[in-house]
Image: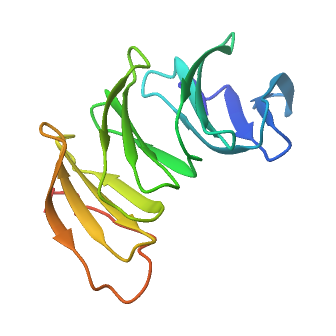
Amino acid sequence: FSADGATLYSVSHDKSLRAWSVAEGTPAGRIDAPAPLNGLTLSADGKKVIVACADNSLRVFATPTLSAALVTTAAPVPFFRVSPDKKLLALAEADGKITLVELATGKVQKQLAGHTAAVQALAFHPNSMKLVSGGADKSVRLWDLATGQAVVVTNGIPNPVTAVAWHPGGN
């Protein structure tokens, strides 16, 4: 939903980003992408709609006009997370990398490499300085975002990791 609650945004495998009028229940806009769309989030201020596309790109649209900027990644982005301070976007990539993008500029800040298979779970620490990731490689990694280094790696998990989370207090 938009910050004012008047607009609902949706994405689909039919390659569309749609805006809907909540009051009317009718379409309010549509943009077609070159490939199916996998995920959507809105920035905290409601001025950006961020979508992950199956063609290895991330598209950031300014609202309400939905004008686009583009970030391209080396592998599909099945999902992403926005940091609690709303400054970074973490992209989980199918090739095992995590790309950090500055939301204000759309520029890649750094890539985190360590997983040997698709990244399937991400969670920012409440202070936005750490990130935990889980992967199809059956590992969990705790990343220090200042250095870009994994400070803890847990291997030997019997199955792929599909969800990670922080306690609300940050522990």
Is 131 displayed left or right of 134 in the figure?
left
Q: Residue at x 72, y 39 (%)?
A: 10
Q: x and y percent of residue 15 in the render? A: 81, 38
Q: How many marks?
A: 0
Q: Residue at x 39, y 64 (%)?
A: 116
Q: Is residue 144 above or below residue 72?
A: below
Closest to the observer: 97 or 69? 97
Q: Is residue 84 above or below residue 93?
A: above
Q: Residue at x 24, y 63 (%)?
A: 141
Is 9 displayed left or right of 152 in the figure?
right
Q: Is residue 12 above or below residue 5?
A: below
Q: Is residue 157 above or below residue 42?
A: below
Res 134 quadrant in image: bottom left
Q: x and y percent of residue 119 in the render? A: 44, 59
Q: Quadrant of the N terminus?
A: top right
Q: Residue at x 20, y 52 (%)?
A: 143
Q: x and y percent of residue 140 in the render? A: 28, 69
Task: Specify the color scheme.
Answer: rainbow
Res 48 quadrant in image: top right
Single out the residue that lies furthest toward the bottom. 158
Q: x and y percent of residue 26 in the render? A: 88, 30
Q: Quadrant of the C terminus?
A: bottom left
